[in-house]
Amino acid sequence: MTEPNKKIWFPAKRYGWGWGLPCAWEGWTVMMIWLLLLVGAAFTMMPKHPVSFETTLGVLTGFLIAICWWKGEKPRWRWGKD
C-alpha cells in the first residue's frame, strides 16, 4: 500500500524496470555522495586492489538500490503508457 503523502526522491522509469534520475534535491544528494565515494574508492583501490574495488562497488550500489527502493516509486515493468 502506498502512502499518499510520501515524498518521492526517485521516480520510476517510463520504460522498463527501475528508477530514473532523481526528482528531489535529496535524491541528487544521494547520487552525488554515491558518485564521490565511488570515485574515491577507484582512486585509492583500483591500481593495486581491484577485487576490493569490485566489492566496494557492489556494497555502494547495494546501498543506492536500497535507498531508491525506500524513497522511490514502487518498481514494476512499464511500457510508457502510464
Image (cartoon, grey):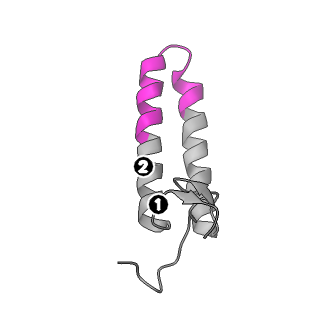
Closest to the observer: 30 or 65?
A: 65
> Could you tell whether 77 is left or right of 3 in the image?
right
**Magenta part mainly helix, strand or loop?**
helix
Drawn side of residue 56 relative to residue 35, left or right: left
Lower position in the chain sequence, tag 1 or tag 2: 2
Up-down: is 71 above or below 55? below
Residue in the image at 56% along x and 62% along y: 12
Name the image quarter holding the C terminus. bottom right
Give, as a three-letter code, the residue at label 2: Phe
**Is residue 67 or residue 13 the one in the foreground?**
13
Q: Which mark is residue 63?
A: 2
Inspect the image, locate mark 1, and give the three-letter code of the amino acid beneath it.
Pro
Picture residue at 64% right of the left edge, 68% below the top? 25
Q: Which residue range is magenta in the image?
A: 41-59
Query: Residue 51 magenta-drawn?
Result: yes
50 relative to 35, above or below: above
Which residue lies at the image location 42% right of the left edge and 24% below the top edge? 52
Q: Do the numbered discs 1 and 2 sit on residues whose CB atoms are within 8 Å? A: no
Residue 22 x %, y %: 62, 62
Q: How many marks?
A: 2
Residue at mark 1: 75
Say which residue appears at 60% left-offset and 43% top-offset.
36
Q: Position of residue 2 (x, y in %)?
A: 40, 78
- Choose mark 1 or mark 2, whichever is in front: 1
Q: Which class describes the residues within 10 Å of circle 2: few (<14), some (14-19), or many (20+)?
A: few
SS type, badge 2? helix
Q: Which quadrant would residue 67 be assigned to in this image?
A: bottom left
